[in-house]
Structure formats: structure tokens, C-alpha cells
Amino acid sequence: MSEGDVKSLIKELQIAPENLPKIFSTDPQAVKIGAKPGQIIKIHRKEGQLSYFYYRVVVEE
């Protein structure tokens, strides 16, 4: 996510980035997209007709 997107998300959710759920930088999906510790990633999941967005902060293992 861009810095502007992160700021908007944090303001919207009224949460500190460190309080978001975590994902390890060694997670296969984090490695695949080149995520670095400290970044926030947006995960899009589809279940049938429904779409969900999840946010994770990347941390070192």
C-alpha cells in the first residue's frame, strides 16, 4: 500500500499500524510480493459473490 493509502486506512480504522494483525516477512505470499518489515499489505479474498479485504503489517520472524 502507498503511504497515502496507509494514512487513510489508519485514520478510517482509528488504529495504530502496530495493532494490525501481523504477517511474517517469510510467509510465502509476503515473499512472493516482496513485502518488507514495517509495510502494510492489503489482501483481497473472494468467496463466491462476496469480496473481503484484510490488512496485515509485515514483521520479521
Image (spheres, rainbow, N blue to C red):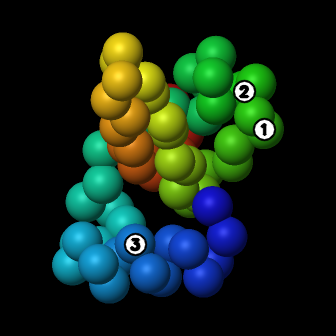
Q: Which residue is mark 1?
A: 34
Q: Which residue is mark 3?
A: 9
Tell me the kind of residue under disc 2.
Val
Displayed quadrant of residue 21: top left
| Residue at image location 39% in from the left, 43% down from the top | 53
Measure the C-alpha gap from mark 1 to mark 3. Answer: 21 Å
Q: Is residue 42 left or right of residue 51?
A: right
Displayed quadrant of residue 23: top left
Q: Are marks 2 and 1 in contact (CB under 8 Å)?
A: yes
Badge 3 or badge 2: first in the primary sequence: 3
Q: Position of residue 57 (x, y in %)?
A: 45, 51
Query: From the image, which quarter does the N terminus lie in?
Result: bottom right
Tell me the kind of residue under disc 1.
Gly
Relative to 16, does residue 36 appear above or below in the rendering?
Answer: above
Measure the C-alpha gap from mark 3 to mark 2. Answer: 23 Å
Q: Which residue is mark 2?
A: 31
The secondary element bearing badge 2 is classed as helix
Q: Nearer the viewer, mark 1 or mark 3?
A: 3
